[in-house]
Image (tube, rainbow, N blue to C red):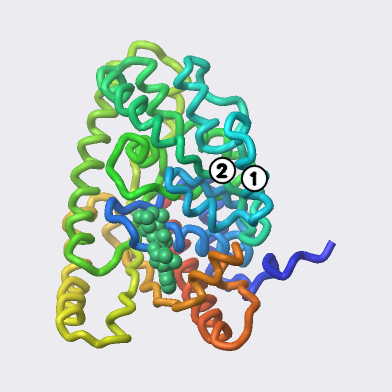
Amino acid sequence: MAKSKALQATHDISNKSSKLLEKIKQNGLQAICFFNNKGGVGKTTLIANLGAELSINLKQRVLVVDADPQCNLTQYVLSDEDFTETYKSESEAQTIYSVIHPLSIGKGYSQNLPIIKTKNFGFDVIVGDPRLALKEDLLAQDWRDAKAGGTRGLRTTFVFSDLIEKAKNEYDFVLFDMGPSLGAINRSILLAANYFLVPMSIDIFSLWAVKNISDALSIWQSELENGLRLAEDPTEILGMSKNKSRLKFLGYVTQQHKEKSENGNPRIVEAYASIKEKLPREIKNKLGNLYPEKGFTPHLGDIKHLASLAPKSQSLHTPMITVTLKGSYTVSRKQARELYEGIGERFLENLAISLKK
Ligand SMILES: Nc1ncnc2c1ncn2[C@@H]1O[C@H](COP(=O)(O)OP(=O)(O)OP(=O)(O)O)[C@@H](O)[C@H]1O
Ligand SMILES: [Mg+2]
């Protein structure tokens, strides 16, 4: 059967990318979260469009998990019909909530992952659920138990590790979209993933966010390691934690300010330039212990402001690279294609450098 237009590749796989993928594949599934505790920095847009680049153009098997109770990613990637079908019954909806709920009623990990195929993005998705926010307390309470080595607490903390474990035969990448907080849900995801990538805007709060992320991660990881040392029960959790190496940093993506090119306000431009200059140093200082010293360039790319292509792609539930409209969209679609192809290749490059094999 012919592929729908949205799923047709927009470029060939370069030799460089196919070599990088060969190396990455030897290491099995990679779980990567897109995180910044500052909101509105383009996390969801990046994950949806980079996910599409990996799936449609680089032919990877990708699962995207919407772990943000705001559910923006889900609204973006599901067609209107799939959206209505998925959420028509609150008690039967198969969402990220169905992954965590069984644990909270003492039934252990869920049996199956609630996976839906997207029509236009090429990847599969575990859709979001506003009720996920209700599980923040459970994860927070059980974290106290986990730190003391309690089996229940560790099992809850490792709920996303179990998700990744269940996905490992079917997928090459699991990508997590997360809300902008350093709360309990995000802690569990960060502790389960192999890598994190930081989308950021160029402003003073992004500099602070880098420090927050670095501080929080080092505290959480040593608390978890302590909990695992104290754990008496050699459960499946300890097996999962042995298979996993410490979370590493995969790089950051900057988001251009629309104001910079449009109103040319010199104060904004000045502040922007000075922060842009500080950023690489701040990243090296705060996150330098989480990536290889040699041959690794943390900056993955600068996301152009793609004007009305971004909202249009949302309303069509289609990645920016395959929006078919003509007129002014022709130029911005070309920019989007170049942009995501470039970020896709840099993403593979950093991943290949960080992996052992
Ligand atoms: N390259 C782009 N060009 C134009 N607009 C963009 C671009 N990337 C993102 N946007 C817009 O910026 C807004 C914020 O983006 P997005 O929702 O991806 O951020 P976020 O970091 O996921 O936010 P949150 O913290 O709320 O989860 C959205 O309205 C989106 O359409
Ligand atoms: Mg978001």
Q: x, y (%) of residue 216?
A: 22, 42
The residue sitting at 19% across, 60% down in the picture is 205
Residue annotated with mark 1: 116
Separation of marks 1 and 2 at Cα, in angstroms: 6 Å
Say if mark 1 contacts mark 2, CB within 8 Å. Answer: yes
Q: Point out the quarter of the image occupied by ligand 1.
A: bottom left
Q: Give amino acid for label 2.
A: Ile
Residue 350 in view (yes/no) = no
Classify mark 2: residues with Cα within 10 Å, few (<14), some (14-19) or many (20+): many
Q: x, y (%) of residue 150?
A: 32, 15
147 or 83, nearer to the observer: 83
The disc label shown at residue 313, or none: none
Q: Give amino acid for label 1.
A: Ile
Q: x, y (%) of residue 11?
A: 62, 75
30 or 45, nearer to the observer: 45
Dot 2 lies on which element? strand
Residue 79 in view (yes/no) = yes
Quadrant of image for the N terminus: bottom right
Which quadrant holds residue 270? Answer: bottom left
Q: Is residue 8 above or below residue 38?
A: below
1 or 2: tag closer to the N-terminus: 1
Residue annotated with mark 2: 126
Q: x, y (%) of residue 94?
A: 60, 36
The residue sitting at 49% across, 46% down in the picture is 66
Classify mark 1: residues with Cα within 10 Å, few (<14), some (14-19) or many (20+): some
The total number of labels drawn is 2
Residue lying farthest right? 1
The residue sitting at 40% across, 76% down in the picture is 305
Dot 1 lies on which element? strand
Say whether mark 2 is within 8 Å of ligand 2: no
The residue sitting at 34% across, 60% down in the picture is 40
